Amino acid sequence: MAMMKKRTVTVVIPAHNEERYVSRCIGSIREAAEVYGGEVEIIVVCNRCTDRTADIARELGARVLTNEDRCIAKVRNAGIFAANGDIVMTIDCDNRMTRGTIREAVRLLNTGRFIGGGAPIRFERYSLPLYLNDLLCRASFAATGLYCGIFWAEKRTFTEVGGFVEKKAMEDAATAKRLRAYGKALGKRYTTLRHNCLINSTRKYDDLGDWLYLKLMIQNAGALARAALGDRTDLDKLLDRLFYDYNG
């Protein structure tokens, strides 16, 4: 059947000093590839790595690229534009995908009704603040339709839209909006997986506390206000600390 056509898939993983997590991320992709049954290429884009991330990725059969940009969208794009797969998926290195993820994404694309999509996000553990965070994410996705997490679309689609929107933060929502608009022009929908999800790492919460983002919003209210008025200096420093320099 056409819906079960096995198309080549590339999974792109951006990584900054992720030697603790790269193995389990690749392992989850290998399990999903086995369920899918088609050819799956894994690309790890090492971003300013000084640890064994690249070595571990190669040992596990991944293709390794390097990128020095301090912009996660540019890191993802380096992998997307180098991908050999007909379909491209992205996942962050400290996260995991569930076993049917690749199969479901390919099935949806094969219907011809969808331009691409995202995936529901579930934390790998829960507490009151993480449960509240989960509810906020679900409500936001339901209200906007801008599903993120694991992105998936045909490579030609990513090429046509120019890949991820190259901004330092909120690039995921901006990219979902870009894909949705492109799909609408073609009479296709931007959607989300229904039977599989992204298993979201809680490492920052483990290190810095489960109320992390609420505290940051309160502590950095001034920086957020200045950014809204055009001065991103303090916000960019915060983003560097939380994301681009988090693992050293």
Image: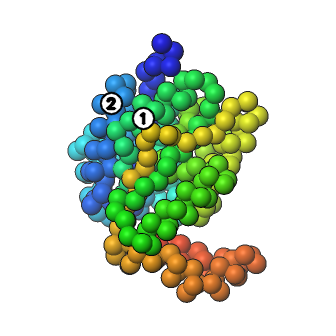
Look at 57% across and 23% down and name the residue there: 111
Q: Quadrant of residue 92?
A: bottom left
Question: In what quadrant of the picture does the C terminus appear?
Answer: bottom left
Q: Which residue is mark 2?
A: 35
Horizontal side of residue 108 vs 92, given as left or right: right
Within 10 Å of the Cα at label 2, are there few (<14), some (14-19), or many (20+) other Cα atoms? some
Q: Position of residue 157 (x, y in %)?
A: 62, 34
Q: What kind of residue is marked 1?
A: Ile
Q: Which residue is mark 1?
A: 102
Q: CA distance from mark 1 to mark 2?
A: 8 Å
**Dot placed on the residue nearer the N-terminal end, 1 or 2:** 2
178 versus 49 height, above or below: above
Q: Position of residue 118 (x, y in %)?
A: 54, 45
Local SS, label 2: helix
From this viewpoint, which residue is outermost toward the left?
59
Seen from the viewer's position, the closer of residues 143 and 17 is 143
Q: What kind of residue is marked 2?
A: Val
79 versus 114 height, above or below: below
Horizontal side of residue 29 vs 160, given as left or right: left
Look at 31% across and 44% down and name the residue there: 28
Look at 45% across and 66% down and name the residue there: 131
Mark yes or no: residue 30 visible.
yes
Horizontal side of residue 200 vs 187, given as left or right: left
Q: Position of residue 49 (x, y in %)?
A: 36, 61
Q: Position of residue 207 (x, y in %)?
A: 34, 75
